[in-house]
Image: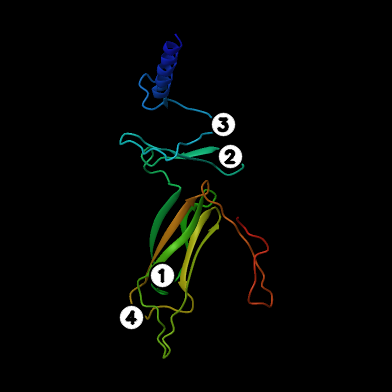
């Protein structure tokens, strides 16, 4: 009798382990398949994580910054034109013909309260060496800064402009645009006073 009961319990355990449970679906695809919204206080992921099937998709979720404190989601296949957590945007800007290399301010119209912009790389179409015996190479001033709610760009070779016989220059500015829900911005002002070396009072991140 004892042996019979043990076999029944063993079979019962095997059925529970291999069972697939569906909520709002009659055809669960995994051990637990939820067709609808779900709220949980915590999730533990199996290691290593399973690969998604060819017909399965994903959604990247994160809590947005205070005071909103909402769960935001991103899925490129669901909303193809929606911004990603990290976006790459390229601007090609033709300069003023009279100056040939100066972009004093270019408004990207990118919302500064929602996105963080970093210039990752740049290019300029014209030669930039000064026409002197020393062939000095001017240093470009490339900035992305926020003002009046949007991100602006500045590009210039300070104290330099291409020679008059050259065509008007064109800047290529490649931007990394981060959703502020997924990135933080830290600002620090340091005064070295009379020294040429210094250190932050405390680490901004750790």
Whichever of labels 3 and 1 marks the residue nearer the N terminus, that label is: 3
Query: In the drawing, does residue 191 fall left or right of residue 19?
Result: right
Estimate how packed mark 3 is, as few (under 14), some (14 to 19) or many (20 or more) residues with alpha carbons within 10 Å.
Answer: few
Which mark is nearer the camera, 2 or 3? 3
Numbered label attached to residue 96? 1
Secondary element type, mark 3: loop
Give how far apart the Cα atoms at labels 3 and 1 are.
57 Å
The residue carrying mark 4 is 165
Closest to the observer, 123 or 45: 45
Estimate how packed mark 4 is, as few (under 14), some (14 to 19) or many (20 or more) residues with alpha carbons within 10 Å.
Answer: few
- Is 77 above or below relative to 27? below
Q: How is the image coloured?
A: rainbow
Q: What residue is shown at x 49% (from left), y 76% (from top)?
A: 158
Whichever of labels 2 and 3 marks the residue nearer the N terminus, that label is: 3
Q: Residue furthest left?
A: 54
The residue carrying mark 2 is 69
Q: Splitting the image into 4 quarters, where does residue 93 fall?
A: bottom left
Give how far apart the Cα atoms at labels 4 and 3 are.
68 Å
- Is 91 above or below relative to 182? below
Give how far apart the Cα atoms at labels 4 and 2 are.
56 Å
Task: Tell whether label 1 touches label 2 (CB within 8 Å).
Answer: no
**Residue 99, x across and y down, in percent:** 42, 74
Secondary element type, mark 1: loop
The residue carrying mark 3 is 41
Which mark is nearer the camera, 2 or 1? 2
Q: Residue furthest top?
A: 1
**Residue 95, x across and y down, in percent:** 40, 69
Closest to the observer, 164 or 20: 20
Q: Answer yes or no: is residue 24 visible.
A: no
Whichever of labels 2 and 1 marks the residue nearer the N terminus, that label is: 2
Picture quarter with the N terminus: top left
Secondary element type, mark 4: loop
């Amino acid at each position: 009798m004892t042996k019979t009961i043990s076999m029944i319990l063993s079979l019962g355990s095997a059925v529970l382990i291999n069972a697939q449970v569906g909520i709002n679906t009659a055809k669960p695809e995994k051990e637990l398949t939820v067709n609808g919204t779900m709220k949980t206080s915590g999730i533990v992921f199996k290691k290593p994580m399973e690969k998604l099937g060819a017909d399965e998709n994903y959604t990247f979720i994160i809590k947005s910054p205070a005071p909103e404190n909402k769960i935001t989601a991103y899925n490129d296949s669901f909303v193809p034109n929606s911004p990603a957590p990290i976006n790459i945007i390229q601007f090609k800007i033709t300069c003023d013909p009279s100056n040939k290399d100066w972009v004093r301010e270019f408004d990207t119209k990118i919302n500064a309260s929602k996105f963080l912009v970093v210039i990752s790389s740049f290019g300029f179409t014209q030669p930039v060496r000064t026409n002197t015996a020393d062939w000095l190479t001017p240093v470009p001033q490339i900035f992305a800064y926020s003002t009046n709610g949007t991100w602006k760009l500045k590009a210039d070779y300070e104290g330099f402009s291409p020679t008059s016989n050259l065509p008007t220059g064109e800047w290529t500015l490649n931007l990394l645009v981060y959703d502020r829900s997924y990135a933080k911005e830290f600002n620090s002002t340091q005064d070295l006073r009379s020294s040429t070396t210094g250190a932050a009072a405390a680490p901004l991140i750790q």
